[in-house]
Image: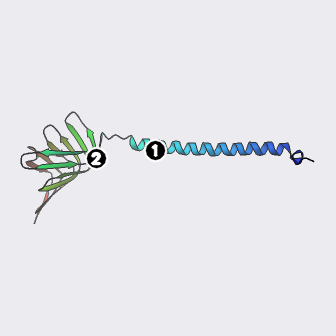
Amino acid sequence: MNIFLFINRYLVFFLAIFLTFFFLIIIFYKQINISNVVSKNLEQKLTNIDISEPKFAINNKSKKIYISAKEGNFLNKDEILLNKNVKFKSIDFSIETERVIFNRDKQTAKSKTKSLFKSKNTIISSEGFNIYDKGNKIIFYGSSFVILK
């Protein structure tokens, strides 16, 4: 006698439906996870930052001042708002702050956030600064603390 005649047709039918349903759940679950990962990656890439890790330089006759930051946004044709970990470095000094407006055309920089100026024998902590005359002059604003060694 044939063994397949003894198998219950309803049992085979329900088992096939169950396996199909189980595989569909797995496929949809994987698809949902993939779309979540893709949407998270897009959210990370789509931010309000115009420039990621911008780098500029202020050039004058005697030295260069290199400027770097984590983020930058264009305010207009010449002005750029630099955000997060903004650093000015030259051979003689360095300045660290959080927000700076840098003018590419005039080669100036202004900040109204807490700033730390360091040179060989001097440390200045201020509430802001203005670099003008192509980096030859720096004015510190607000309550400033000067440490001379």
Kindly state the secondary structure of the residue where label 2 is placed: loop
Q: Position of residue 1 (x, y in %)?
A: 93, 48
Q: Is residue 114 visible?
A: no
Q: Position of residue 9 (x, y in %)?
A: 85, 43
Q: What residue do we see at 27% from left, 40% from top?
A: 73
Outermost residue to the top = 77
Report crowding for label 1: few under 14, some 14 to 19, many 20 or more residues within 10 A (C-alpha). few
Q: Position of residue 128 (x, y in %)?
A: 17, 50
| 14, above or below 85, in the image | above
Q: What residue do we see at 17% from left, 45% from top?
A: 57
Q: What residue do we see at 58% from left, 45% from top?
A: 30
Kindly state the secondary structure of the residue where label 1 is placed: helix
Horizontal side of residue 73 vs 133, given as left or right: right
Outermost residue to the right = 1
Separation of marks 2 and 1 at Cα, in angstroms = 21 Å
Q: What residue do we see at 24% from left, 42% from top?
A: 81
- Marks 2/1 in contact by CB < 8 Å: the verdict is no
Disc assigned to residue 40 = 1
Q: Tell me the quarter of the picture where residue 145 sits.
A: bottom left
Horizontal side of residue 61 vs 48, given as left or right: left
Closer-to-camera residue (121/42): 42
**Mark 2 / mark 1, whichever is N-terminal:** 1
Closer-to-camera residue (23/5): 5
* Residue carrying label 2: 53
Q: Quadrant of the C terminus?
A: bottom left
Residue type marked 1:
Lys
Residue type marked 2:
Glu
